[in-house]
Amino acid sequence: MADTIGIVGGGALGTLLTSRFLAAKADVRVVVRSPSRLEMLKRDYPALRGGTDAELLRGSDLVLLCVKAYDVPAVARSLAALDLRETAIASLQNGWGHMEILAAALPRLPLLAGATSLGAYLDERGSLHSDEDGRTLVAPWRPTDLPSAERAAEALRRAGLKADTCSDARAVLWRKLVLNSAVNPLTALARCTNGTLEAEPALFAIAERAAQEAARVGWKLEVLEKGFDPVAALRSVLRETAGNRSSMLEDLGRGRRTEVEEITGAVVRLAGEVGESTPVQAALLTLIRAAERRPQN
């Protein structure tokens, strides 16, 4: 495998992708913020080319962004300072609004929006636990970026991961937002795996209403196709990722900032702009905000 792959972020997803691309003999360059996390990665992957400086990404064919949504502005500035010429940037963030930030900072580079159901978490030692059976969908942010999206999907497939392309990035991102906003806050509050939401009818009823609310906002914004069935999609992702622990569950349990503002907060804010009522989404947002302010046991 001759690809040169840059990965920004040493969390669970970034580590999973690092492990797969290294196994496929790609030239992998990983940039992380924390020196201690870098040490852990090098402990588990001695051949890794890693560092804390974005300069390491020069020469990459593809850069995968695996940072939190609220870190995208800082990452965009770091990438812009490199003055990259042809590198494709694929964002695998949760939430809504990050692609516009990247497009403003990197107007000449191919930009790709990604949605993945790969499951991973890091244990207390920082070691990876993952379910690599999920699928990743890659979509061009601009029509001219479609060839780059196809090459990115092929690179993921060469690394042994399931990947496809789609032409409509905004629909991909809103479908992802529908599911994340229905699953992540609820699993964090109930302290359960994704599959528990389907197994327990009371929890599924809440997730179902949250997904329906987010879908209605997407339809009013005209970013979601009319034929999308939020309940069927919710059941499908819960079964596909039944054993997964959501990133919001992990973050809340470890006392870290969650992405609730970029996920649920985005749905509630945009619902207000289009005049759509989202009481379940608003309640989940309030509860996660309150939980973030309290120490976790």
Image: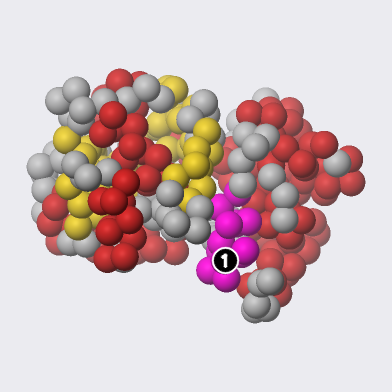
In the rendered image, is residue 57 in sight?
yes
**In the image, residue 218 lies at what x, y percent?**
63, 44
Answer above or below: position of 51 versus 240: below
Task: Please say whether residue 253 is one of the residues in the magenta stretch.
Answer: yes
Q: Nearer the viewer, residue 43 or 183?
A: 43
Q: Nearer the viewer, residue 74 or 102?
A: 74
**In the image, residue 168 lies at what x, y percent?**
46, 31
Task: Categorize mark 1 by other alpha carbons within 10 Å: few (<14), some (14-19), many (20+).
Answer: few
205 on left or right of 87: right
In the rendered image, is residue 98 in sight?
no
Residue that appears at 63% across and 56% down: 249
Q: Nearer the viewer, residue 51 or 115?
A: 51
Q: Nearer the viewer, residue 111 or 44?
A: 44
Residues rendered magenta in the picture: 246-258
34 on left or right of 197: left
Residue that appears at 57% across and 41% down: 176
- Determine the secondary structure under disc 1: loop
Split into 4 quadrants, where in the image is the C terminus?
bottom right
Split into 4 quadrants, where in the image is the N terminus?
top left
Residue that appears at 28% across and 58% down: 38
**Residue with the mark numbered 1:** 254
**In the image, residue 282 lies at what x, y percent?**
74, 63
Residue type, numbered disc 1: Arg
**In the image, residue 46 lies at what x, y percent?**
22, 45
Residue that appears at 32% across and 25% down: 159
